[in-house]
Amino acid sequence: NAGVTQTPKFQVLKTGQSMTLQCAQDMNHNSMYWYRQDPGMGLRLIYYSASEGTTDKGEVPNGYNVSRLNKREFSLRLESAAPSQTSVYFCASSKPTGEVGQPQHFGDGTRLSIL
Amino acid sequence: QQPVQSPQAVILREGEDAVINCSSSKALYSVHWYRQKHGEAPVFLMILLKGGEQKGHEKISASFNEKKQQSSLYLTASQLSYSGTYFCGTENTGGFKTIFGAGTRLFVKA
């Protein structure tokens, strides 16, 4: 059982390039999330999708777009990468919407460097 | 708003106890606790729902004081494997997204 799978694991971009980070889960979870993690800042929510067909902004959405392609997949796109977006990106998923207090299951992360 | 965790870092010897605190300025519905080892993904430890319940997970337990909007994570008789960064995540009443604190770095030495 793979859980939450993120691709790629590492990526280096030049400023201004675009990139899509992929995330897929096989746990039949409805809710999915994208976080970025910077040293000393913890996990900051970028966007989330409470259920298939819906997406909402989190704490730091500027510079990002998301697509909930289907129940399994939730992608994060950087249209014009900036050095400030250098970070580790985590995707997570949790059980059906409406059940507050559900644990999140995290992928292994994507380490993204923008030069 | 991001919950506030304290302390920011703690160093323990094996067998010692530690307490990590998490507080929020907003009313809370639930508090999550996760542990992350260096270079790895965060791993779920436990969730506490409003009602002041206390939960346990091996030698790690937690409490949730709804009135004070605070939660504490208790690590007793610490082991080397407890080293890592501990995050609390809070869900506010009426919302379904979790906001994480900045983390508490715990180092257990032999």
Image (cartoon, rainbow, N blue to C red):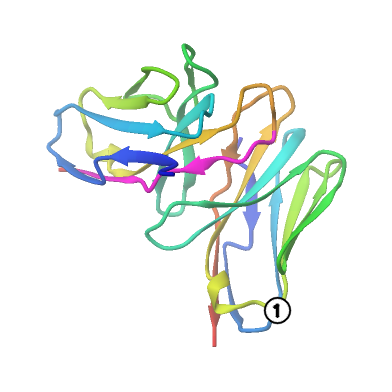
Judged from this view, the residue extending furthest toward the bottom is: B110
Chain under callout 1: B
Task: State left or right for residue B25 relative to residue A30.
Answer: right
What residue span does the magenta drawing correspond to?
Answer: A101-113
Q: Position of residue B61 (x, y in %)?
A: 75, 61
Q: Position of residue A54 (x, y in %)?
A: 49, 13
* Residue drawn 45% across the image and 21% down it: A71
Q: Is residue A53 above or below residue A12?
A: above
Q: Is residue A3 magenta?
A: no
Where, quadrant-wise, is the C terminus of chain B in this rendering? bottom right
* Residue drawn 40% across the image and 17% down it: A70
Task: State left or right for residue B4 relative to residue B110.
Answer: right
Q: Secondary structure at mark 1?
A: loop
Q: Nearer the viewer, residue B110 or A29?
A: A29
* Residue drawn 33% across the image and 27% down it: A76
How many labels were placed on the picture?
1
Q: Quarter of the image holding residue A77?
A: top left
Task: State left or right for residue B94 relative to residue A78.
Answer: right
Q: Position of residue B17 (x, y in %)?
A: 71, 76
Q: Is residue A110 magenta?
A: yes
Q: Could you tell me the amino acid type at mark 1? A: Ala
Judged from this view, the residue extending furthest toward the front is: A1
Query: What residue sits right under mark 1 in the picture?
Result: B77
Where, quadrant-wise, is the N terminus of chain B in this rendering? top right
Q: Position of residue A41 (x, y in %)?
A: 47, 48
Q: Nearer the viewer, residue B46 or B91?
A: B46
Label 1 Cα crowd, 10 Å radius (few <14 / some 14-19 / many 20+)? some
Q: Quarter of the image holding residue A26?
A: top left
